Image (cartoon, coloured by chain):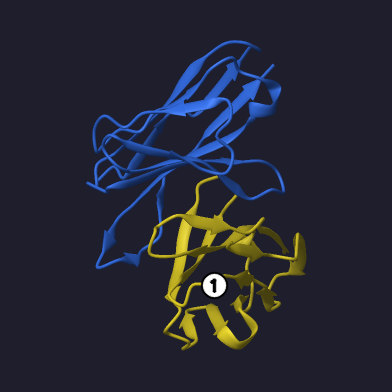
Chain colours: A blue, B yellow
């Protein structure tokens, strides 16, 4: 199994450009998430989805958009990139069985620099 | 609101020393789950352990052990006889049945030979 696959691994954007970070999982997990990791700040939740067609904001959603048209894919869109969006982005997925929380499977991350 | 505090920003030890990484959490939920993840220099996030709030038994896995104490809202992680390969950032996380995890800010462990 591939698990959670993120592309690209690295990207440099100019201020004002847009891009989409791709995330796909092959584990049939219903929950998917986008986090950003800034130095010394841990991981902050940007958006999450509890299933196809359902998304919701996390702690730091401004400047980002998501969609979830299929169970497998959860792309993150950056519109009008700003230097404050320079970060490492992680996609993750999870499942629940009888309401328990089994934690996340993470992708390998995307390192984004906005200049 | 849920919160995880990892007060130790960075710890440096010499190989073969024992080291404990602290994690203190806050939640009003009676059912919750605690996790530790490892982030080596390569950057990926690796799952280490999951513990639910009803299981206060300590766990040992090789050189790793975890001490869960509900009375002090702590879930500490000890590495015995540390090795250079243990050098990484370690994250503690808290979750409920709603699946979202809240992460601490991480502790960077540097093990020198």
Which element is circle 1 on? loop
- The quadrant the C terminus of chain B occupies is bottom right
User: Is residue A22 something that shows in the picture?
Assistant: yes
Whether residue A45 is situated above or below residue B90 in the rendered picture: above
Left/right placement of residue A61 relative to residue A14 reads left
Left/right placement of residue A94 relative to residue B53 reads left
Q: Nearer the viewer, residue B103 or A66?
A: A66
What residue is shown at x 59% (from left), y 38% (from top)? A60
Picture quadrant where residue B2 is located:
bottom right
Whether residue B24 is situated above or below residue A40 in the rendered picture: below
Q: Local crowd at mark 1 within 10 Å, few (<14), some, or many (≥20)?
A: few
Picture quadrant where residue B6 is located:
bottom right
- The quadrant the N terminus of chain B occupies is bottom right
Give the chain letter at badge 1.
B
Left/right placement of residue B8 relative to residue A20 reads right
Whether residue B67 is situated above or below residue A92 in the rendered picture: below
**Residue B36 pos. (x, y %):** 52, 65
Look at mark 1 in the image and give the residue it sits on: B28
Whether residue B59 is situated above or below residue A67 in the rendered picture: below
Left/right placement of residue A52 relative to residue B92 reads left
**Residue A102 pos. (x, y %):** 36, 63
Q: Which of B23 and B28 is in front in this view?
A: B28
Q: Which of B48 and A40 is in front in this view?
A: A40
What residue is shown at x 49% (from left), y 72% (from top)? B29
**Residue B106 pos. (x, y %):** 65, 57
**Residue B40 pos. (x, y %):** 57, 52
What residue is shown at x 31% (from left), y 45% (from top)? A3
């Amino acid at each position: 199994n591939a698990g959670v696959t993120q592309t690209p691994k690295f990207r440099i954007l100019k201020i004002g450009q847009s891009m989409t970070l791709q995330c796909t999982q092959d584990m049939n997990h219903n929950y998917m998430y986008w986090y950003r990791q800034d130095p010394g700040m841990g991981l902050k939740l940007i958006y999450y989805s509890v299933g196809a067609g359902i998304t919701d904001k996390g702690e730091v959603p401004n400047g980002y958009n998501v969609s979830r048209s299929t169970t497998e894919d959860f792309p993150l869109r950056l519109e009008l990139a700003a230097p404050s969006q320079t970060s490492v982005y992680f996609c993750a997925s999870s499942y629940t069985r009888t309401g328990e929380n089994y934690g996340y499977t993470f992708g390998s991350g995307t390192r984004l620099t906005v200049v | 609101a849920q919160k995880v505090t990892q007060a130790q920003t960075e710890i440096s030890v010499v190989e073969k020393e024992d080291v404990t990484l602290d994690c203190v959490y806050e939640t009003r939920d009676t059912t919750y789950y605690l996790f530790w993840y490892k982030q080596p220099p390569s950057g990926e996030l690796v799952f280490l352990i999951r513990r639910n709030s009803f299981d206060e038994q300590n766990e040992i896995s090789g050189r790793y052990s975890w001490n869960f104490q509900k009375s002090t809202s702590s879930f500490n992680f000890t590495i015995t006889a540390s090795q250079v390969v243990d050098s990484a950032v370690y994250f503690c996380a808290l979750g409920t049945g709603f699946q979202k995890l809240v992460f601490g800010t991480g502790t960077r462990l540097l093990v020198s030979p």
